[in-house]
Amino acid sequence: MHIVDKIINKYKNNNSLYIGEKVTITEHMVQTAMLAEENNSTESLVCACLLHDFGHFIIEDPDYLVKKSIDGKHENVAFNFLKNYFKPEVFEPIKLHVQAKRYLCRSKSYWNILSEASKTSLKLQGGIMSDNEAKKFISLKFHDDAILLRKYDDDGKIPNIKTKKIEDYRDLIISQLSF
Ligand SMILES: [Fe+2]
Ligand SMILES: [Fe+2]
């Protein structure tokens, strides 16, 4: 099976709720991609938004990890898989999207708008960035795309709204492959 079909099937066959939210992981990622499109993002960023939590599809039992207060490092799991198939413009912001959250939480007003689930996971993910960590983060090439991704990520959690289907993104996914 072609890798793009494998990826699309994961979205179609996974009905798990996004941890602590009222949307499935699939709905959440499609909503995040749609927000990127509405904000005229590049195709690479739309694709990064669409795939950003793909790590949750690979991790065996994400709910178990949450219950045990273990961070499954879903951003690294996704990165290690996606880097074999996609352009850096896609997998680098994904790798950094949790760092972007930790960076943005340096602003109290940003922290205030986080969902309860997201506030809980922040602690497991290392908490708010220190000055030194923030300095290092903003020197990274794809940090700005990671920040944009993260903002759409926060808003892509609305239950019961009509969204595109994963198949609607097939051509876009194909266009972002590295081979
Ligand atoms: Fe995530
Ligand atoms: Fe997310």
Image: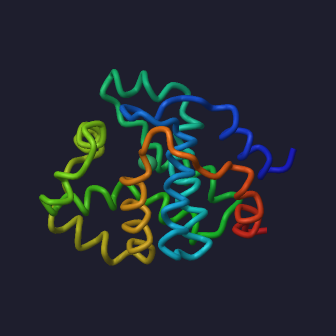
- Closer-to-camera residue (169/159): 159
- Indicate left or right for 109 with 39 as reference: left
The answer to whether 179 appears left or right of 163 in the picture is right
Q: Quadrant of the N terminus?
A: top right
77 sits to left or right of 145: right
In the image, residue 38 lies at what x, y percent?
A: 51, 69
Q: How many marks?
A: 0
- At x 37%, y 67%, the residue is 147
Q: Say if 41 sits above or below 54 in the image.
A: below
Q: Residue furthest right?
A: 1
Identify which residue is drawn at 40% across, 68% down.
148
- Give the quarter of the figure containing the C terminus: bottom right
The residue at 15%/63% (across/down) is 107
Please provide percent x and percent y for residue 118.
30, 42
The percent position of residue 18, horizontal first and vertical second, equals 46, 35
- Tell me which corner region of the image, top left, top right, bottom left or bottom right, holds residue 129: bottom left
Q: Position of residue 39 (x, y in %)?
A: 47, 73
The colour scheme is rainbow
The residue that appears at 69% across and 32% down in the rendered structure is 13
- Of 74 and 168, nearer the camera is 168
Left of 156 or right of it: where is 123?
left
